[in-house]
Image (cartoon, grey):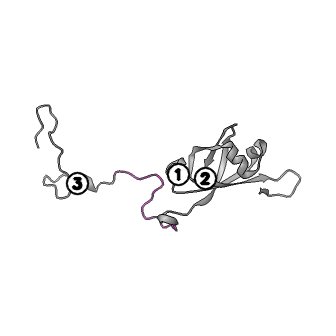
Amino acid sequence: MAPGADGYRAEAEEVGPGREDGSPDPLGVPMGVLIGGSPGAAEATGPAGRAPDRRVSAQLLRFGSGTCQVVLPDWRPAIAVSVPTEQLQRSTGLGPEELRSALLSVVINPEAVHDRELGMRDWQAELPAARGRRRGRRPVR
């Protein structure tokens, strides 16, 4: 197809298998990989063919009066996720000072592409044992 007077093609060119000019077929070229998706994953699947939700550790980066910032290293180690402070305190039963030193975990959808798809629930916290006590952690609730 020849270009028009303005130098642009007047119609879209048909591209597909069996191209007569011998050029590569762009329909067979993979265009990218979806974050969180992996072809041929051999993991067990849950409802609707997705991996079951799982508990992961959560690291508190910032404690704020309205919102806390946490990182879920098993999901995306370089992304901070916002969590309402009230939700964290209510779920764990901890105050601000205890939350800052607690080891947190939460149940998430591991296949989430965006933080709004994580479905974070069932927060749990463990407090490090005080000095002079036996070694280990004291579970909270």
**Callout 2: 10 Å neighbours few (<14), some, many (20+)?**
some
The residue at 45%/57% (across/down) is 37
- The amino acid on which the numbered mark 3 sits, given as a three-letter code, is Asp
- Nearest the viewer among 116 and 104 is 116
Marks 2 & 3, CB-CB < 8 Å contact = no
Image spot of residue 55 (x, y percent)? 63, 59
Along the line of sight, the residue nearer the viewer: 106 or 131: 106
Magenta stretch in the rendered image: 31-44
Q: Amino acid at mark 2?
A: Met
Asked if residue 92 lies left or right of residue 28, the reply is: right
Point out residue 50 in the picture as x, y percentages from the top left corner: 49, 63
Report the side of 1 relative to 38 (left or right): left
Q: Circle 3 — which element?
A: loop
Quadrant including the C terminus: bottom right
Picture residue at 43% right of the left edge, 65% below the top: 40
Q: CA distance from mark 3 to mark 1?
A: 35 Å
Label of residue 120 in the image: 2
Q: Nearer the viewer, residue 96 or 48?
A: 48
What whole-number distance in Å separates the C-alpha atoms at marks 1 and 2?
9 Å
* Image location of residue 96, percent across then percent down: 76, 42
What residue do we see at 85% from left, 51% from top? Answer: 130
* Local SS, label 1: helix
Q: Quick check: 39 left or right of 127?
A: left
Q: Is residue 38 magenta?
A: yes
**Residue pointed to by mark 1:** 117
In the picture as drawn, the residue positioned furthest to the top comes out as: 6
Q: Amino acid at mark 1?
A: Glu
Which disc number belongs to residue 25?
A: 3
Residue 60, quarter of picture: top right
Residue 6 drawn in magenta? no
Q: From mark 2 to mark 3, how far is it between C-alphas? A: 43 Å
Q: Magenta region's main secondary structure?
A: loop
